Amino acid sequence: MAKEKAVGIGVIGFGTIGTGVVKVLQRNADVIERRLGFPLRLVRVVDLDLETDRGVDLGDVRFDSDSDSLIEDPAVDIVIELIGGYDVAKQMILRSIEAGKHVVTANKALLALHGKEIFDAARKRGVDVAFEASVAGGIPILRSLREGLAANHIESVYGIMNGTTNYVLTQMEATGEDFDVVVKRAQELGYAEADPSFDLDGVDAAHKLTLLVAMAFGADLTYKDISTEGIRGLTPVDFAAAAEFGYRIKLLGIAKAHRGPDGEESIEARVHPTLIPKTSLLANVDGAMNAVAVCGDAVGPTLFYGAGAGELPTASAVVGDLIEIAREVRRGAAGRVAPLSYLPHELSPRPILPLDDIVGRAYLRFSALDRPGALAHISGILGDHDIGIESVSQTGQGGDGESVPVLMQTDPVRESVLREALDEIERLSDLSAPTRLIRIEEEL
Ligand code: HSE
């Protein structure tokens, strides 16, 4: 039987992931071809930096800075966009689509903001846009939602979607060190970027959750709809208290579908540090690893664990996309898979459940002045709002000399009620700093 022709690949962006893609295409060419029946052929690589030694031999692959000509090159069937960012990446993707090329990208920030425009353009042109690497790196969570779990009404999707923050939280807990010390070390070790704001402030996790919400529920949200809080401001005292109360602290992205009595569905979508029971599976996901849990009405709970970043794990997801698209190209089926799992006209805006309406237990760290009556004033106001206190712990450590941390777990309370009580408590003269609230999730 005549061998089928190779599918041509062009890579724009020869950084960490681009290098990983070249390595995987080279070292796993055999297994890829045994699965596809034809090879994937790297045709061209583009980057502005033509000097740095990436430790891979490109052989006769053309390497230059000319992205326009890569996009127009008839030998390139699939363009991989790995430059990140918004404007230039968007233009390159749209130009590739216009040129009839399929696109693979890891750019969650771009898709969370401009996904609709990009997917519309691809649909009209009959090409595919695949983005498995954009959420949870090497974990095939998007393909699982789109295919393996497609039989289900998805009830919830949640998890640890950012490796940088999970590394920082794990280290703070293990060492008792301050946030700034741990972040600096994470940067030195390559776990955090020079500017880690997107990670530390929860923005990166919110980008990923935006894509997961669309794929899980068919809900058309932008990432601005997601209530987002990062991990800054957590102190060693919080980790010690969490442990004492039986929890660990994780930055979670949480999305759930709620059906009202009239059948209308609303979506809860939030990113914030969360206390979760230390015996739960998610609580034991440490370091830079990610884990995403999906609960479907038929399948029940599922959990996906793996590396959320890194050269080869992310390249594994990118090349997996290449294989899927290449297969469709050869079978003449390109453009037939809805990128967000639901058919485009089935994606619809859904009301967002306000954070104020969420009911749950909370951990509170008050910075109380070390004087008689302070604790009584705080608990009095909580009592006035019918907020039960499950436990209290006061430590002499971690304060500023005049104040001491008072740590509490509340009973379940509506967030709006808790906020009202905390506003009132802030007005007391017994506090030296704003109160830290961390939500507790027993079961998601
Ligand atoms: N900065 C991301 C993280 C990796 O820390 O998880 C890419 O998504």
Image (cartoon, helix red, strand yellow):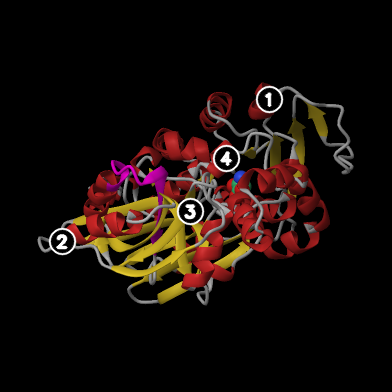
Alpha carbon separation for disc pair 2 and 4: 39 Å
Locate residue 29: give its quadrant: bottom right
| Mark 4 lies on residue | 103
The N terminus sits in image quarter: bottom right
**Is residue 339 among the parts visible in the rendering?**
no
Q: Which residue is mark 1?
A: 67
Q: Are marks 2 and 3 in contact (CB under 8 Å)?
A: no
What's the residue type where badge 4 is placed? Val
Q: Earlier in the sequence, mark 2 or mark 4?
A: 4
Question: Disc 1 versus disc 3: distance between alpha carbons?
Answer: 58 Å
Q: Which residue is mark 3?
A: 404
In the rendered view, tell whether residue 164 sits above or below residue 79. Answer: below
Residue placed furthest toward the front: 372
Earlier sequence position, callout 4 versus callout 3:
4
Magenta-span inclusion, residue 438: yes
Residue type at numbered disc 1: Ser
Which of the numbered marks, if any, corresponds to residue 133? none
Measure the alpha-carbon separation of dots 2 and 3.
Answer: 44 Å
Q: Secondary structure at mark 3?
A: strand
Q: Nearer the viewer, residue 368 or 231?
A: 368
Q: Quadrant of the C terminus?
A: bottom left
**Image point (51%, 61%), residue name:** 395
Determine whether the beta carbon of the residue marked 1 sits less than 8 angstroms from the nearest atom of ligand 1.
no
Q: Amino acid at mark 2?
A: Gly
Mark 2 lies within 8 Å of ligand 1 (Cβ measured): no
Which-is-in-front pick, marks 2 and 4?
A: 2
**Nearer the N terminus, badge 2 or badge 3?**
2
- Secondary structure under tag 4 reads strand
Range covered by the magenta-colored residues: 425-440
Identify the residue under disc 2: 260
Q: Position of residue 284 (x, y in %)?
A: 58, 70
User: Residue 288's quadrant in the figure?
Assistant: bottom right
